[in-house]
Image: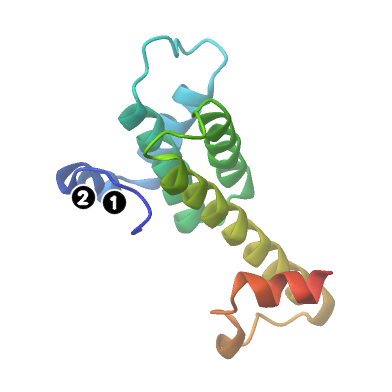
Amino acid sequence: MDVFQLEPDTTELFDDMSIEDLTEFVNLHASPDFDRSGQDDSSIELFIYACFLVFTKTASIQALDQGILSAEIWVQETPNDHVQIGRRVNILDTLVARKLQAQTEQQHQTDTGLPMPESDQGTSIAQIIRRSG
């Protein structure tokens, strides 16, 4: 995904991981026992990316929520004048938008018993917000 700035070798490695390995990575790093002291920005971004990948491969809102929570903390801990604040907010916004889109699709399927029409699957976040508002 374009909003992440990870090394291509790293994203390729994670993209090729099995769902089980990705989920294990996310669960290990989300554990309260995991030592986060000394984590650098690339480690935080990699965890958020892994959460996003689990979501895209499994539709797990829980994994996406873990990524959103980490992105929220990451943004909150970033000074407003930091050179990367805009990109980090963009990552958070992207994750939240994907969650809203997934919830809209799930609600549509619950209401109608049918999957979302393909023509609506690329709906923008503004359109999703207007529909849910």
53 or 127: nearer the viewer = 127
Residue 45, quarter of the rendered image: top left
Residue 76, quarter of the rendered image: top right
50 or 94: nearer the viewer = 94
**At x 54% / y 47%, what residue is drawn?**
92
**Circle 2/circle 1 CB separation < 8 Å:** yes
Q: What crowding class fits label 1: few (fewer than 14 Cα within 10 Å), some (14-19), or many (20 or more)?
A: some
* The N terminus, quarter of image: bottom left
**At x 50% / y 28%, what residue is drawn?**
79
Q: Amino acid at mark 1?
A: Asp
Q: Amino acid at mark 2?
A: Glu
**At x 36% / y 11%, what residue is drawn?**
38
Residue 32 in view, yes or no: yes
From this view, report whether residue 21 is shown above or below residue 35. below
* Helix, strand or loop under label 1: helix
Residue 54 in view, yes or no: no
131 or 51: nearer the viewer = 131
Q: Is residue 38 left or right of residue 133?
A: left
Which disc, if any, is residue 60?
none
* The C terminus, quarter of image: bottom right
Find residue 100 and report its horizontal and vertical position in percent. 67, 61
Residue under numbered circle 2: 12
Residue 130, quarter of the rendered image: bottom right
From this view, report whether residue 88 is shown above or below residue 131. above
Q: Look at the image and name its color scheme.
A: rainbow
| Alpha carbon distance from label 2 to label 1 | 5 Å
Residue under numbered circle 1: 15
* Helix, strand or loop under label 2: helix
Find residue 77 and report its horizontal and vertical position in percent. 53, 25
Find residue 56 and report its horizontal and vertical position in percent. 47, 57
